Amino acid sequence: MNLYQEFLIIAGIICGLAGCASTSDEVVTSTKAASVQSSETSSLKSLTSNTSIYFDYDKSDLSVTASSQIRSLAKALKSNNSSKVSIEGHCDERGTREYNLALGERRANSVKELLVLNGVDSKRISTVSFGEEKPAVSGSNESAWSKNRRAVVKVY
Amino acid sequence: MIKSLSNFVLISFLTCISFFIHTQLRIEVTQGIKDPIRIAVTPIAWNLESPASHYIHQIISSDLSSFGEFDAIGTSEMLSLPQSEEDIYYRDWSILKVDYLVVGSTAKLDQENLLEINYSIVDVVRRRAIHRARVVGKITDLEALAHNMSDRIYREINGISGIFSTRIAYINREGDSQGDYHLRFCDINGDNDQIVLTSKEPIMSPDWSHDGKKLAYVSFEEGTSRIYIQDLKTGEREALKLENGINSSPAWSTKDDSLIAVLSKAGNPDVYKYDFKQKRWIQLTSHYGIDTEPDWSPKGDKFLFTSNRSGSPQIYEMNISKNTIRRKTFIGDYNARARYTPDGKSFVFVHRVDGDFHIAIQNLKTSKIRILTDTDLDESPTISPNGNLVLYATKNGTKDVLSGITIDGATKFSLPTISGEVRDPSWSPLFK
């Protein structure tokens, strides 16, 4: 059932990406996605460091890359049951601050949902949105914006 | 209930620092109107021994010319300095093309520390006073007295109240990206700048209570967003009931102490009203989309809010008693954070055109939109209580700055800062 739901989500995302490929600024290549997916060591490493998951503008759905990042993370989390997860949702500076606070929460929730679908106990996960208040990179250009539209997964 | 102070948060007890005047913001007119009204405010005759400020006329001149609507001539240009209507030699003023003249004198009252100012506003062309007034105040409050006179002079000439006694609350971040966040407020001219709250974590969305005595705002000092209310005189602070998810966008009623805000405790952001007695939240909107950024109508029967229920952020209006919701914006794919004009007939909001975010105004009846700004990352619009000016946050390079524009678009101004970033402005009501 879980796998089926996940399949539907990812299928939806792929359709979504295909639909707005011309406006999407994050180029997702299949090789990039595959390399993350197959790399067990990177997922173990990510348990001790923060993982950033990036989003399209005004979107909270997960890209193929993001989904495979989260699945690897879920696998590592399941093999280490004592750790807890906090997910921060963030936005770029465009649009209004209060709307972005809501959007940031959607992003954090998207990550949480996929972790839970992949077997991580929801009680281990907390989410918080900072909207556009805590950019990772300063600057008013696409390069900065794409790095600020993110969810940061912290394992502790 | 006053929350205990954590290490990271400092509530400034304003009374203690009110003597510390630090100017953070200054209005600079960047685009003025072609024919501002020429006014001359002569030095108010000072019949007192007190060495206190002789500068009432300078404060008034500076107030009136601050948004470019008036051109107040300096004392050095004046050919005579009348102190009452009888002393006016009209040719001295018509030769300077002055439209209006303000003359007056002070007298000390029997009561300790009180003085009165008698003044007249004179129409130079018609050669008669359009207004005569007597104001009484404390000698120690001369500055406030002068701002009140500016408000009155503005109203007698323009037909709407001046806003020189109002204040602006805003968020300021020091220097670099590691800097502290401050919630501050100051007079319109930047004077009497005071810090309400200092925190290592973000502060956002300040909003004034209807009487101008309290600010509601969102602070992340506990690691997550939470709504606080702070009395500006006592510094006393109340933390509103924290719910799971975001706690955001507090909006006071313009009539009483009612407050609405946005919570996502039910799984998605909706608008709630706070019950101060029971300390609980009552749900007003319910939709799986994002509902946020509410603003009460001046009558208090409706509120505007942003919702992405149609797929993109648009402005909606809810009638509270009828429990009905109507979509208000249909042009563009990003319309957000609407604020009613004081007459309740229009709203200003963030409107995206070709990828750029501008401040625009829309008439509620005709739905006609007029774009007010030409910069591209504009947000957080707030309207002066006389409905004449819009202040908003924008970017100057990579820096967050405040800018403003008259609602007719004729005059533009900026509020440069000495240091750091400024954002999230909120205009106070008129103080009674």
Image (spheres, coloured by chain):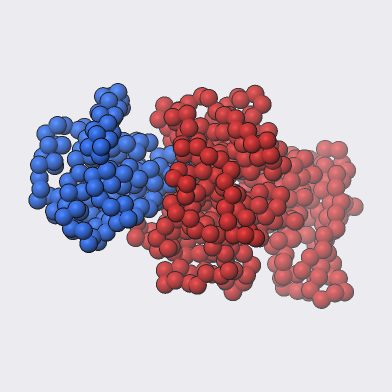
Chain given the colour red: B
In the displayed structure, does residue B316 sit left or right of residue B211? left
Q: Position of residue A79 (x, y in %)?
A: 16, 55
Q: Quadrant of the N terminus of chain A?
A: top left
Residue lying at 77% horizontally and 50% vertically, measured from the top left: B152
Q: As rendered, which of B62 and B143 lies closer to the eye?
A: B143
Looking at the picture, tell me which residue is in the foreground, B358 or A150: A150
Q: Which chain is blue in the rendering?
A: A
Q: Position of residue B215 (x, y in %)?
A: 59, 58
Is residue B15 in sight in this rendering?
yes
What's the residue at 13%, 42% (across, down)?
A36
Q: Nearer the viewer, residue B40 or B28?
A: B28
Q: Could you tell whether B57 is left or right of B207 in the image?
A: right
Left or right: B19 in relation to A143 = right
Q: Nearer the viewer, residue B221 or B143?
A: B221
Let me know if residue B416 appears in the view. Answer: no
> Which quarter of the rendered picture does the C terminus of chain A lie within?
bottom left
Give the image location of residue B361, x and y in percent: 58, 32
- Vertically, is B358 above or below A144? above
